[in-house]
Amino acid sequence: MTIANTGATGNTDSTDRAERAEQLRNDLADYIKGWGTFRTPRVEAAFRAVPRHLFLPDVPLEVAYGRKPVVTRRAADGTSVSSASSPKLVATMLEQLAVQPGQRVLEIGAATGINAALLAELVGPTGTVVTIELDDDLAASATESLEAAGYPHVEVICGDGALGHPDHAPYDRIIVTAEAWDIAPAWWDQLTVGGRIVVPLRLHGSGLTRAIAFDLHQPDRMVSTSAVVCGFVPMRGTTEHAEHHVRLTDDVVLKVDADDLPDHAALAQALTHPGQEHWTGIQVRHDEPAEHLDLWLLTTTASRFGRLSAGSQARTSGLADPAPRWGGAALYDAGAIAYLATRDINDETLELGVIVHGPDNTKLAAHATDLLTRWDSARPSQPTITANRANSTPRPNTAAAHIIRPHTAITVTW
């Protein structure tokens, strides 16, 4: 009798857990839908179908179906090495990718396998999904989870994602789920002309990154259809690229591009100079599509660009309080720093301003406020980003900002 009762209880618990998982899965899909993220019924249906909790077996259901990323592995220094990305961002990128039934899809970065399962739902029974993971144990775990969740046909490859997987090429779609410094040659080679790649591309050494949907118009030329603000764990392997920053205090760092040759010693003294506030009167609504203001600043000025990261102590004390909405976007010159700041006008609107630290900062302050005035007059919402293979001849465009990578020449226009 004891054994029978235990079995009955176990079955009940299993049923209750499955029902609870289904409820949480639909709650998460409802939340994403409420943001207007789903633009197609098929992506929404995929989110309601894939059992996320089976890919995160050691995580409570409420966390597995939560709204935030779930870190699944950390390096020795505590930084995230692998994670299940924010579900809302995953949905956004799948909408960017615009997968069609029957297509061949390559994913760079299997991680837990959740995204590969979503892709399998989108390509359907006649499509193909190949996903690549650098670490053999993560690849094995993703394989097991995909089989347990009902997606054994997804092929998991253990290898360097920058090399792609030529055996199933060419692909109609490629999606990269880690921050990339460049568009790897293999991705150019393995994407069919007319196909699309969605890649979180770091456009500046400070970490300014966009998930860009590129259509391959010619074998050596891609043009963006959309760009979305995002943050991802950086790619590892042959294309790994280190970050560079200047520490201003224990709680504040300025993330920069090493190629700009920042003066570390001078910048380290910037916050010893009291901040000077310059409020512009420019108002921005919270729901306004102004998320690319930082990218506009980067690509519109010859001044050196950085991103100021301040901890809670620095913000509370008033030492540094950069605008989180634009990732702490800042300009700097020698030992002077000017960063974007905001203050609330009302519940719906904020005012843009600039806070400047450092000696001889008058010119930098004037330049930064002038740039904001120029931005306000046009308020560009989406950039056009063009990528040309490094061995091709890019079309000249004097109005474009040029970003050069080892394998790709990138231009940004507004």
Image (tube, grey):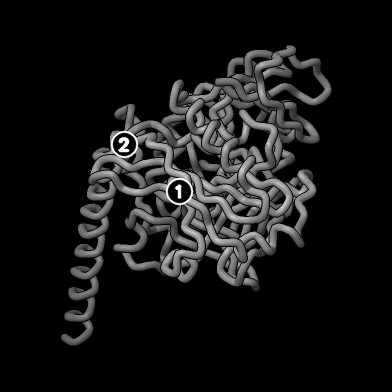
Q: Residue type at mark 2? A: Arg
Residue 65: image tag: none
Image quadrant where residue 194 sits? top right
Residue occupying image coordinates x 52% and y 36%: 369
Kindly state the secondary structure of the residue where label 2 is placed: strand
Q: Which residue is mark 1?
A: 341
Which residue is pictured at 31% across the width and 48% down the height?
Answer: 344
Location of residue 69 by image quarter: bottom left
* Placement of the C terminus among the 4 image quadrants: top right
Q: Are marks 1 and 2 in contact (CB under 8 Å)?
A: no
Q: How many marks?
A: 2
Q: Position of residue 186 (x, y in %)?
A: 74, 33
- Reading the chain from its start, which is encountered first: label 1 or label 2? 2
Residue 90 in view (yes/no):
no
Q: Position of residue 355 (x, y in %)?
A: 51, 50
The CA span between labels 1 and 2 is 14 Å
Q: Quadrant of the N terminus?
A: bottom left
Q: Nearer the viewer, mark 1 or mark 2?
A: 1
Within 10 Å of disc 1 (Cα), the crowding (few <14, some 14-19, many 20+) is many
Q: Position of residue 394 (x, y in %)?
A: 76, 16
Q: Nearer the viewer, residue 4 or 321?
A: 321
**What label sits on residue 285 in the rendered view?**
2
User: As rendered, which of 350 and 236 lies closer to the eye?
Assistant: 350
The amino acid beneath tag 1 is: Ala
Q: Is residue 161 left or right of residue 353?
A: right
Residue 127 in picture, x, y percent from top left = 50, 29
Residue at (76, 44) in percent of width and height: 260
Q: 317 or 394, which lies in front?
A: 317
